Amino acid sequence: MKELHCPACGTPCVRVISGTSLIEKTLNRLSIFHVRCQLCTARFQARRPGNRVTSQAFDRREYRRLPANFAATLILDQPAAGGLVTDISMGGCALQATTTLTRGTFVKFVLHGPSGQGDINVDSAMICSVQPQSVGVKFLEFDPEDKQRMGQLILELLADQQAPPRISSRS
């Protein structure tokens, strides 16, 4: 069967997302699924004959979370919390940090990229979960340049996950 590609950017990094409305569920029964590009965030429909069940494990997220290890800062009026991003996607991340911010708080999010790359700014983000040692952050608005740079970072993380393990030649 032909591999799905995003019609907006051409990448095969797409994910079938679960439909919640009656119309989406009906379309799923007709083998028409909603798909989200993991890099440019475009949403589109695709016909997958014979595929009533997706091959991915059930997950209500529209974006696949990827393990990460980056420093980041949440900003309200002043730096509110700094921490370590433990997983990330184009839709949000988990930030290992303790904060007094509550669920539903809108913040600016700054991802301090790997060495040699500048910070990636998310102009508007929301705290969507608060745990004792971490917070879940949903990304809402990016500057187009920062969104493109975040997509490049996600692509690099995806490539690292799909690369075969390196074998050391040391004895």
Image: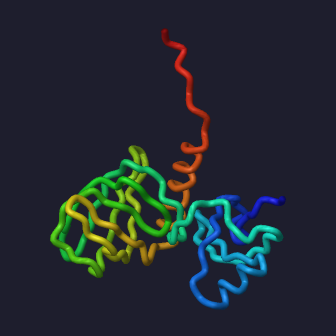
Which sits in the foreground, 47 or 75? 47
Q: Nearer the viewer, residue 158 or 52?
A: 52
Residue occupying the point 26% across, 61% down: 134
Task: Check the image and report above or below for 167 versus 54.
Answer: above
In the foreground, 73 or 60: 60
Residue 14 location, x and y as percent?
Answer: 65, 64
Left of 27 or right of it: where is 135? left
Image point (29%, 81%), residue name: 104
Residue lying at the far bottom of the rendered structure = 22
**Quadrant housing residue 73:** bottom left
Left or right of 74, for residue 148: right
Residue 149 seen: no
Q: Can residue 75 be seen?
A: yes
Relative to 1, is 100 on the left or the right?
left
Residue at 27% in and 80% down: 105
Residue 40: where, in percent of width, then height? 60, 68
The figure's colour scheme reads: rainbow
Residue 113 placement (x, y as % from top left) = 39, 52
Image quarter in which the N terminus is found:
bottom right
The answer to whether 8 appears left or right of 30 in the picture is left
Image location of residue 20, percent across then percent down? 57, 84
Q: Residue at x 36, y 59 (%)?
A: 111
Which is nearer the eye, 103 or 74?
103
Label tally: 0
